[in-house]
Image (spheres, grey):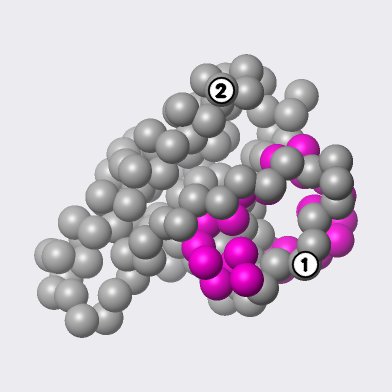
Amino acid sequence: MKKILFVCSGNSCRSQMGEGWGRELADGRFEVNSAGVSPFGVLPATIATMKEAGVDISEQTSKFLDPKLIKWADYIITMCNNALDSCPVFPADVNHIHWDTENPDRLFLSEEDRRKEFARVRDWIKGKIVNFYNEID
């Protein structure tokens, strides 16, 4: 079974969505996890946005990207440029993919615009994962 690790800066939003969708869409074919370079907890808006799409990530936790997780993974998907720039060098046997995913947690947006942005990013990540699973399966 292939193991997939989603990584972003804070492991609070994008990589958590990746983990949630990754598990939801895995259909027993993949193991999925997520981590952050500087984790600070899963945002309530992330949990709510995924719940709107029928995916419960309320039990997911924010984890630090450590050597054990890196070694565990067959595929590491970095989800923002900050994570890409901050990540250690990955072992040669780990496939690294980079998706520069926009951060929906923008303070300048109205609450409605922020909700829409979270949903847009959530749906974009789902599409990327569907395509990725089709490629590696």
Identify the image quadrant of residue 87. Answer: bottom right
Q: Residue at x 76, y 24 (%)?
A: 1
Question: Which residue is labeled 1 in the image?
Answer: 88
- Near-viewer residue (104 or 63): 104
Which percent across, then down, holds residue 119? 26, 50
Quarter that holds the C terminus: top right
User: Residue under circle 2?
Assistant: 135
Question: Alpha-carbon neighbours of circle 1 within 10 Å: few (<14), some, or many (≥20)?
Answer: few
Whether the magenta-drawn stretch holds residue 73 is answered as yes
Tell me the magenta residue range: 59-85
Q: Is residue 107 visible?
A: yes
Q: Name the element at disc 1.
A: loop
- How many badges with numbers are in the image? 2
Q: Is residue 45 visible to the viewer in this orientation of the structure?
A: no
Image location of residue 10, percent across then percent down: 55, 71
Q: CA distance from mark 1 to mark 2?
A: 26 Å
Give the x, y percent position of residue 55: 41, 39
Q: Name which residue lies at 86% across and 51% down.
A: 91
Label 2: few (<14), some or many (≥20) within 10 Å? few
Q: Residue at x 41, y 44 (%)?
A: 125
Task: Look at label 2 and name its amino acid.
Answer: Glu
- Label 2, secondary structure: give it: helix
Q: Earlier in the sequence, mark 1 or mark 2?
A: 1
User: What residue type is disc 1 on?
Assistant: Pro
Q: Is residue 7 above or below residue 134?
A: below
Per the rendering, the mark at residue 104 is none
Report the residue at 51% width, 46% height from top. 18
Compared to 108, does 84 lie above or below? above
Is disc 1 in contact with disc 2, using a CB cutoff of under 8 Å? no
Any magenta on residue 36? no
Measured as percent of width and height from the top left, residue 52 is found at 28, 44
